[in-house]
Image (cartoon, helix red, strand yellow):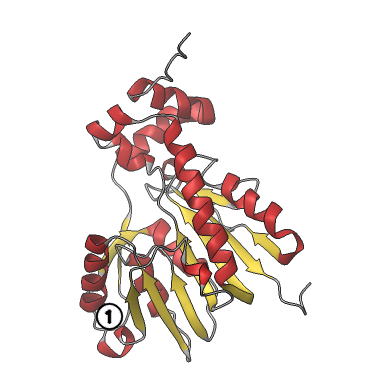
Amino acid sequence: MSKEKPATGPEAFDARYRGLFGDRWPALAAALEGPSAPLPFIASPGCEPYFLDKASVEVATLLPLAEGEILDACAAPGGKTLVLASRLPPGASIVANELSSDRRRRLSEALDRHLPPGLRSRVRVSGEDAAAMCRRNEGRFAAILLDAPCSSERHVLGDRKAIEAWSPARPLALARRQWALLSAAFIMLRPGGSLVYSTCALSPEENEGVAARLARRAGAAASFEAPLGPIWEARSLGSALLPDRAAGAGPMYAVLVRKLGSDED
């Protein structure tokens, strides 16, 4: 007997997130379909502003920066890279990595357009698979931002083809890719360094579920901190920022991971 195929499309999407958010879902769905909260971010005085969501600024500001190389593992379209660049301490540089050649081109254009030459020279664009970079970069980076590809329910709700094609299998498949990226990022982080894992997804499998998997794998070698503030909502690991309670910003999930060195164990 053939197995019944899981439901797909708008009704399955609505049922999935109504199950997660209950009576809150109608207001949250309306906020997701409504306008976002873009901010004009200026990376350096005199530079052209770059408009990005308030939640993106929050996440890129969350990462502690230190002297050495900083990795923006999935950097396109470039807004978070600009925020990181604006905060670079002396002796620090950024590797802005993006696997897609088309998105990498747009990333480079954004950096060229919105950074002054001196600061732009401290940001190098690369095109590797961030899940495979750990094979030759163990312990290389002082800090890592991993804003991982995700379900992006805000996009799904605004795209008829995307919501018609939506399936419960989608967040599960993305969570597997996110785990590959996060586990590789932790390997590439130097002891004493910090890593921010973030997504613009609502699905717990892609958010605290992925973070919890790292917590189990790393054990005492890592500590986890949640973003704090009135617009952040605590999760079992990390925090979420959702547009119905953040004036249209988000959605965004984030957790700060610290890789403990020998003197911190």
Residue 130 location, quadrant: bottom left
- Relative to 3, is 83 above or below? below
- Relative to 172, is 263 above or below? below
Which residue type carries mark 1? Leu
Q: Which residue is found at the position 22% from the left and 66% from the top?
A: 106
Give SS at disc 1: loop
- Relative to 142, is 118 above or below? below
Q: Which residue is found at the position 79% from the left and 72% from the top?
A: 265
Nearer to the camera, 38 or 82? 82
Residue linked to disc 1 = 115
Residue 75's spot in the image, x, y percent? 36, 65
Residue 28 location, quadrant: top left
Residue 66 appears left or right of 222: left
Is residue 234 visible to us here? no
Residue 189 appears left or right of 250: right
Residue 10 location, quadrant: top left
Nearer to the camera, 188 or 257? 188
Residue 254's spot in the image, x, y percent? 53, 55
Is residue 180 visible to us here? yes
Residue 42 appears left or right of 26: left
Residue 13's spot in the image, x, y percent? 39, 27
Nearer to the camera, 80 or 125? 125
